[in-house]
Structures are given as structure tokens and as C-alpha cells.
Image (cartoon, rainbow, N blue to C red):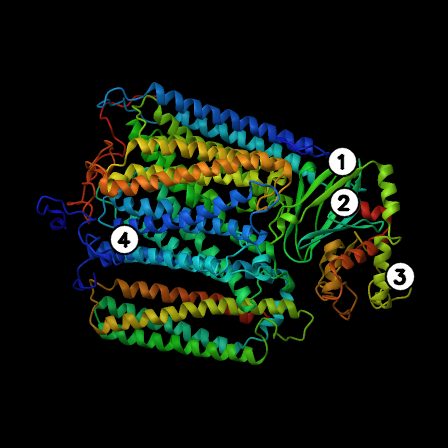
Amino acid sequence: MSTVSEPIAGTKVHYLNADYGIKSWLLTTDHKRIALLYLAGITFFFFIGGAFAVLMRLELVTPQGDMMQPETYNKMFTMHGVMMIFFFLIPSIPAVLGNFLVPMMIGARDLAFPKINLLSWYIAMIGGAFTLYAVVAGGVDTGWTFYTPYSSTYSNTHVIATAVGVFISGFSSILTGLNFIVTIHKMRAPGMTWFRLPLFIWAHYATSIIQVLGTPVVAITILLVGLERGFNIGIFDPELGGDPILFQHLFWFYSHPAVYIMILPGMGVISELVTCFARKKIFGYAFVAGSSVAIAVLGFLVWGHHMFVSGQSVYSGMVFSVLSFLVAIPSAIKVFNWTATLYKGSIVYMTPMLYAFGFIGLFTIGGLTGLFLATLAVDVHVHDTYFVVAHFHYIMVGGAIMAYLGGIHYWWPKISGKLYPEGWARLSAGILFIGFNLTFFPQFILGYLGMPRRYHAYPEEFQVLNVMSSAGASILGVGYLIPMIYLVWSMRYGRPSPPNPWGSAGLEWKTPSPPPTFNFDKTPVITEDPYIYSHDEEVEVG
Amino acid sequence: MIGFPLFPEQASTVAGSVDLMYFILTAITVFFSTLIFVLIFYFAVKYRRRRPDEIPPPMHGALRLELAWSILPLFIALSLFAGGTAIYFRNVAIPPGAMEIYVVGKQWMWKLQHPEGPREINELHVPIGQAVKLTMTSEDVIHSFYVPAFRVKMDVIPGRYTSLWFQPTKPGRYHLFCAEYCGTNHSAMKGWVHVMEQVDYNNWLGGGATGESMSQAGERLFNQLGCLTCHRATAPGRGPVLEGLYGSTVHLQSGETVVADEAYIRESILRPQARIVAGYRTQMPTFQGQISEEGLLQLIAYIKSLAPKERIDTAQ
Amino acid sequence: MAEHPAVAAHHQFDDLEQQLDASTLGMWVFLVTEIMFFGGLFTAYAVYRSAYPEAFAEGSHHLDLTLGGLNTVVLIGSSLTMALAVRCAQLGSNRGAANYMIATLILGLVFLVVKAFEYHHKYVEGLIPGPNFVFDSPHARHIELMFCFYFAMTGMHALHMVVGAGLLIYFILQARANRYSPEYYGPVEVMGLYWHFVDIVWIFLFPLLYLIGHR
């Protein structure tokens, strides 16, 4: 192994320059290169999904629905949801940052199954290609939820191509989760006990469990919808006595935990950022780690809260309601522990830390508004309105994407070997925060006023709030373009980064930037807990 | 109603309790969000790094704090759950004696029919102060009946009946939306609920009546389809007697019992063999595909009208 | 990595033991995902069967118990030969492993051929769900639903068999190239896990589809 990272003619050999040419990338089994392949792929899907969002917000500036036809608008929000959820958010942090960092953080040379890792990227791209085909061929208009019988019988759009795309990409998610579980179980460096794992790893472990247990269920469900359309296998067809509500049960059994696939890795990122930029050990390590697992487990028991008004019995509604409330507890534990970590820290306001602050604040709002939806009496009113839209964008955009961008900035020096321009980065973090709140906060009010989601035209009295939201969306759009530009710029022109520019205690920073192909010249031996910045005696608090 | 509203109108008996819950939740959200924002801001300023080589004192977690911020949220969450669930159970319980209106959703319109006969499309006229129960089904995909001013919503599902109720408290015109995405013109599947004074409602009923009430229409259909050949009240017919059926407990051939509600009657018309009454043979033909959803509702209204009045009340 | 000599661990592993551990755990995790996959189908089946018990029983009478029973025996036999193949690989007998896997493959193909005949019968009898479905019974629509399950469940299972057969061919070629030894037999063992799983799925499908009408 050590031969790979020996200096040749003054420049160090690392994973980026160990080999050249398109083949060396497309056939790589290096987890770091695969992470970059994912980064390219999901950035592409993110901007496609984002473009749909921009068009939707443009349409919603006026109440009449005069910019595009209703079928076009319906395709816009469907493709926005499908692209963002299945092809951006679900792979985002695990497949890019997780792929890059999981082996490095546990002191391994690679994931347990490098070829499967590459395969999962190809699968994701093939799934994406099917979905893009559906877009180009005319789009799909079922909503990302594919509710039957609309999706199975009534829609005249490209449901099968999209369903196949989503089905295929599910395997990518399963294989990534499987790879992480095995890697975390079997590939830890000597001395890396479970309770010395960084919280990023705990979060990914919990995420992987959800991916492995949940994704197959949505795979079979989506497959059955495809079979119903293509081959009359009418399992959800009311004409045959089939039950469209059963589809919703099976769909949400995955798709609610899928929300935690998106947010849990983000929580892992935040734990790394907060500790590094406060130079403090995480407050309450066991609680933060345990709450990740608790969220993963509870997440599987709450799917019915998407169906409070679907005619299910009031008693099952009651059970799902109380379980949904319980998810708030581990989430609250995390927020309080991050905040407590800042106490008596040594805090710097580098860009990743700004994203972490943004995450904690926005996730708090997103999480607390989730309580409205868990409350049966209130959910009856706000279900399927813009309140729900605002709530989950606070979690997914305010939470998951903030964490993703924070993580990308934090590990960018490690990934690219270059420093990004701090001024621009702080500016765009600020723009994103403002744009985000302006876009989505008015939607809470719209939702309580009663504006249903997925509406192409709406009553006039909702216009002012919609215009505010659209204005925010344009700011948000600019905010996403800036990092894209300066990060690409920095790959070529950025200042070279030292191995550990932030002075982090993480194992991944003990490698050169960028790291050599097999990460470590010698397998590291771990002798202490994570996040140790000081060996002084620990102070008792509380 | 044009302008810049920030809060929806309250126009039903349940709206106040839903809003109360909403305000409590909002207060909790504002409190905790502010707490977290202030703490982060305060810590970020107070403990900003002053020297590049500054190392803060390490500290480990504190069990007492952890327990405090686990148990306190748990307590709050469970209280909210209890409050929200209690209000919900009270709000969804349909009061006896509610006036019944039948709703059929289809892409992309609402078809409503009053028991007295008048039919409406995308408009619903109801008297103030009167509890109204909607029995709803769909001809095609899933829809959702939503009146924000009443704070009520219920999905409308093909192949089964769902119901919701409300009691308007304020005269006026309120939005009716379809809240479950149902295809191309989902956003056009909306209408108005007109809440009128009782006198106005009576006038409206008188003016718009077709002369045939729903149960009369059902009776006509009943005769047309030849149901009377077997289902007679007097002579021992080949089929069970329908008088007093609605709301009663039926003993089935399989030994089970079932309460004869809308869903049971619907199933017995469409798929007679599914649940056969004890003592009868399986000779009734299926009427699947021969009766529209509205026709079914009329037949049900007719069969209901055959039941003694007090039965109807207890069945609800 | 395929160029590595047979007994060297892949670069990411410290030794062969870790490699075997990892690949075995990987397969178990994969089987968990398979259980969830079929679990979705079985759940839907359970919901409908409890809703329409007579229709499912009546539909079940139209499945060929003899062919289904034959296939059950064939599959159990193939699991036995697969287990013997794993045993041979562990003992270092590449020849034995290859032969037993060939036997497994043949049994698997027999299963698929029988299945194809059954599907064909259903086609002739007009039991394929869709516009051409004919069934003279008051429960016809629910029986059509039952046949939806029959084709979805056995179809998914058959697809897994086809994948398994493809994998077997690969491992047979590997065994014939003398790739396995008492130190390195993991791939055959992992293949065995997969094959047994597919077998077990059938053990559940057979009574749930073929036997429910026969009390």
C-alpha cells in the first residue's frame, strides 16, 4: 500500500492524480472517487429538480394559473419531487460525504465491497436515466407519492418509466446501506470501538438500517403499481376489490423513514461541524449517538400519520399520533446537545459553522412544526396544505441541504486539496438562509389559511404570500449557484490546503489533503475517544 | 375576502377548538425556537475564539441535564398528544340527528345531493346551526373534501364510504377545496359552501327542489331494477325484508354478524354473494356496473327511509 | 482485483477471515432486504386473503397441486445439492463443488420449466388477470385479484430463480478453474445462502397459494 503515496518528482501522489483518464474514473473502485462521481451525478439532478421548482414558483406568482397548462404544472411538481427526493436527497449526504468519509473515519482502506459501491453508482445513474427519459418523453403527473388508483389507472403520463427509474435507484440506496453496515461492523481499525466512532458514523449506521429495511418495501410497492399499469396485476384496483389505501400504507412504510434517510446523515454532519468549530468534545456523546438509532427505530412506526384523513380508524390514528410525538424526543435531545456543546467553547464563524447554526435553527422550527401534524385535531385541517409543504422543506432544505452544504464546505479541503474562498462562501450561506426563510415561512401561513398543495391556480386572497414565497425562491436559486461556481473555481485556482486546515481532531484529517488512494499509509490504531481537543481534566457541568 | 388575510375564518363549531390547539402549538414552537436561536447567538458571541491557539476546557455530558431535556419534551409532547386527541375525538363524533347530504367526487367536480332532492355541483347550501353529515364516495380516484373555514377534511375514496360532519356557525360563503391530488384539474375542483339562515335555506330548498326527494328517487330506482320482486315487506320473499334493516344487526350465513351500515348495503347490492344473510340462498344477481354511485346513494337513502326513525339515530 | 491469486484477500481487507466475515454479513443483510421485499407482498396478500377468504380458496382450486408439489420437491432437492456443493468447497474439492452446483442448476431449471408449463395452462384457461380473464363465479373479481397475487408472487420468485441460475453458472466456472480451497470458499457459501433463501420463499408460497383451498 505504501508505494502508492510516495512522492514522485516533488508532487505527492494522491487519489486524484494516482491515475488519469476517463476509464480510471468510470471503472474506479476507490470510495473517494466514487463519492466524486456521485457528487457530479446528484448535483446534476439537483439543478434539474431546482429548475422545476423555479418554474413552479413562477407560475404561482399569479393566482390564475396563466403561465402554463395545469398538466404541465402537475408534471413540474411531480418531477421536482421525484428528482429531489429519490435522486438528490436520499443519495446526497450518504453517497457523497458518507462514501468519502466512512472508511476514513473508521480507519479503513476502503468500503467492504468496493465493486458493489461502484455498481450502486451505475444503478443510481441508470435509474436517473429512466426518469430523465420520462421527463423528456413528456413527463409524469402523479406526484412523487404515486397514489393509486390515479397512478395505476387514470394518469396518461409516463408512470412506468418513472416507476422503473425509482425502482432501480432503490437498489443503489440498498447497496450503499448494505456496504456501510458491513463496513462499520467489520472494517474498523484496531481500537476503534463502537463508542469511539464519530457521530457521523453512528448517523450513517442508523441511516443504513433504514435504507436496508425500508427501501425493499417501496421497491415492491412501486413495482406493483408498474405491474398494474403494464400487466393488469391489479393489486390496488378498487374494481377488483383491491384497496388503494393499502398502497398508502406500503408506500409510507418506506417513505416516512425515508425522511430520516435524508435528515439523519445531516445530523451526523452537524455533530462533526459543531465539535470542530467549537473545539469541544460533543456534549452527551451517548445520547446523540443513541438518539440516531432511536429515530431510525421510531421512524418505522409512524407512517400512519400521513393518513389521518384517509378514513383509517380513529384508534389507529391515535396510536400513530402518539408514536409521532415520541420522535420529537430524540430530535430534541440532539438539538439541546449541540447547543450545549457550544457552551464555553472556542467558536469561529467559518462557513461550515454558519451552516451548522442555520441547520440547528431551521431544523428546530421544522421539527416543532411537525408537532402540528402529529396532533390529530390540527392535522385534519393542515393535512395536504402548504403547511405540510413548508414543514418538510424546513426539514429537507433547511435541514438536510444546509447540512449537506456545510459538510461539502467542511470537507472540501480534504476532497479537493484546495481551500474554498471564505468570503464568497459566507456570503452565499447568508443568502441561502434569507432566501430559504422568505420562501418557506409564508407557506406555513398559507397552509393554515387552507391553501391545498399541488394547486396550479389558487384563490386571489393567497396571492401576497405566494409572491413573497416566489421572491424568496429566486434568492434561494442564486444562493445555490454561487457555491457551485466558486467550488468548481477553487478546484483549479484555490489555495492548496494543509492536511488539517480546521485543526480538527477527526481521524480523516490525519491523512494528507487530498488523501492517498488507500487513505492511510499504515492502518491507524485508535487509543482515545473522538473529539478530544484537550487532555485537561474534564469539567463537571449541570 | 380579497386582501391579505393571515388567519382563516372560523365558521363551524369545531373551528375554535382546532385553533386553540394551533395557538398552543404555535406558542410552544415560538418559545423553543427563540430559546435555541438566542442560546446559539449568545454562545457564538460570548465564546468566540479570541486566540488562534485557544483550547476551551473539556467537559463531559451531564446526566441530569440530559434527563431534564429528555423528560421535559416528553411531558410536553404527551400533553399535546392528549389534548389534540381529545379534541379530535370530540370533533369527529357525528351528533345524532345530523342532516344527511350525499357527496360523489369525480374528476373534477363535486356532486352533492340533499335528502329532499335538490342536487348541486360544486356548491353546497346548508342552514346555519344545523349539524350536517356528509356521506361521500368517489367515482374514480381519491379526492378529499376540505372546507378550511370549518377546519374539516376527509378523503373521498372509490369503492367505499367515508363521512365527515360540521355545524356552521356563521352565514357566508366559504371555500370548498379538493385537497388530495386527483389529476389535471385538481386545482379547479373547488367550489363554495353557502351557509344560510334557516328561512333562506328553506326558500332555497323550495326554489330548487326537483320535487323528488333522494329516498323517492331511490324508491323509483328500486322498482325499476325489480328489487321488489324478491325484497317484499309483506309476502315471504326470496330476499330478506329491508324494512328496519338500516342500523340493525344482521346474522350472516357464515355465522358472523354485521351492522347494516352504508358500506354493507352498498356491498350487498354490488356483490350480493360476499356476505349472505342467514337463511337465504345466493340467488341475487350482482348490480356492479349497472348503478351509478349516485344511484347507489339514492337506494341507500331509500332503504334508510324504511327504518324506524330512532334506529337511524342509534346507528350513528 | 480479479488478478489477485485465489488465496490473497482483497486490498481493503486485512486477511481472508475478515473478508469471509464481511461477505457473509453482507449476504445476510442482503437477505434481510429480500425478506422486506417479499414481506411487502406477503402483507398485501394477508390483507386481501382475510378480506376475501372464499375467493382465495376458490381460486386456489384452479392451481395445479401436482405440479406445485413436484416443484416443491425439486427445490428442496436443489437446496440439498447446494448444501453439498458448499461442503465440497469447504473441503477443497472443486470438482465436487462444480458437480453439485451443476445438479443444483439442473434442478433449478426443472423448476422453471414446470413453472412455465403452469403459466401456460393458466393462459389457456383464461386465468391471466386483465380483460381476457374469465371465471364463472360470483367471486370472479376477487378471484382475479387472487390470480394477480399468484402471478406477482410466483413471478418475483421465478425472477430470483433466474438470477440464482445465472450466478450458479458463474460459480460453476470458477470451481472448474480450481478457485476454491479450504481457505477460500466464501463465494460458494454466500451463493448457498442466497439459494436457500429463494427456496424458503417457495416453501411459504406453496401452501399460501396452492393449499389454502384444500382443508
Disc 3 marks which residue?
A: B233
Residues marked 2 and 1, same chain = yes
- The residue depicted at 15 percent of the width and 45 percent of the height is A521
Instruction: Inspect the image, locate mark 1, and give the three-letter code of the amino acid beneath it.
Output: Gly
Q: Are marks 3 and 1 on the same chain?
A: yes
Within 10 Å of the Cα at label 4, are there few (<14), some (14-19), or many (20+) other Cα atoms? many
Which badge, 3 or 2, is on the more N-terminal residue? Answer: 2
Residue C138 relative to residue A94: left or right:
right
Along the horizontal axis of the image, is C80 left or right of A459? left
Amino acid at pointer 3: Ala
Q: Sequence order check: which comes first, mark 2 or mark 1?
A: 2
Q: Position of residue A132 (x, y in %)?
A: 43, 57
Q: Are marks 4 and 1 in contact (CB under 8 Å)?
A: no
Q: Chain of mark 1?
A: B
Please determine if labels 4 and 1 lie on a single subunit. no
Pointers 3 and 2 within a single chain: yes
Q: Quadrant of residue A147?
A: bottom right
Query: Percent position (x, y) of residue B115?
Result: 83, 49
Q: CA distance from mark 2 to mark 4?
A: 63 Å
Q: Nearer the viewer, residue A485 or B172?
A: A485
Do the dots labelled 2 and 4 sit on one chain?
A: no
- Residue that badge 2 annotates: B124
Rendered image quadrant of residue A284: top left
**Disc 3 vs disc 1: which is toward the camera?**
1
Chain of the residue on which disc 2 is drawn: B
Disc on the earlier residue, 3 or 1: 1
Residue at 74 percent of width and 38 percent of height: B173
* Mark 2 or 4, closer to the camera: 2
Q: Which residue is mark 4?
A: A112
CA separation in Å, label 2 and label 1:
12 Å
Residue denoted by label 1:
B172
